[in-house]
Amino acid sequence: MGTSSYKIVEKQTIEKYQNFCFSEKERKYNFVIPWIALNEKNYKEYKSLNKKEQTLLLHKVLVGNILSVAKAFEYVVLSELKVKTKVKPVSVVYKEVPMIGFTGDFKINFKLPEFIGLGKGVSQGFGTVKSV
């Protein structure tokens, strides 16, 4: 982790089955670790938009993040995903580069497993979500 090293003295594996599928019912999730939604290209676009357009862009990115995970799980999403977000920008550092992340929550008609990561930097914990 950066210039520090840590000795791992114990590890544990827990196998747990969780749903990952379309839901007729809207579900609410919270970002427990900031979500890095924007890459270099869409960050520039985001900065040029008004507040409403920024929100719509974040909705599009979030749906795209979920569709990417679905593809990795070989799950085909056949229905339209509808999302609502209530997020605020925060400063984060990813790979020693300052970036913008988002904290808050979102509602979507999709069941996500607890503590799944969405967006950029998921291997470092960014974008981790928990149901509310």
Image (cartoon, helix red, strand yellow):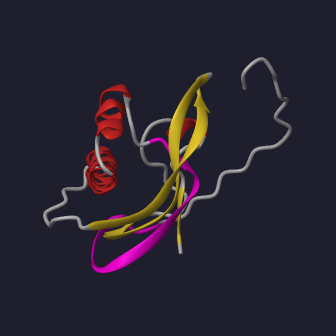
In the image, residue 39 lies in the stretch drawn in magenta: no
Q: Position of residue 18 (x, y in %)?
A: 46, 67
Quadrant assignment, res 15: bottom right
Where's the N terminus, which quadrant? top right
Residue depicted at 33% across the width and 78% down the height: 26
Q: Position of residue 116 (x, y in %)?
A: 49, 54
Quadrant assignment, res 96: top right
Residue depicted at 26% across the width and 46% down the height: 71
Closest to the observer: 65 or 56? 56
Looking at the rendering, the stretch of residues picked out in magenta corresponds to 18-36
Closest to the observer: 55 or 21? 55
Residue depicted at 58% across the width and 27% down the height: 98
Closest to the observer: 129 or 88? 88
- Could you tell whether 122 is left or right of 23 in the image? right
- Could you tell whether 28 is left or right of 6 in the image? left
Q: Position of residue 43 (x, y in %)?
A: 36, 33
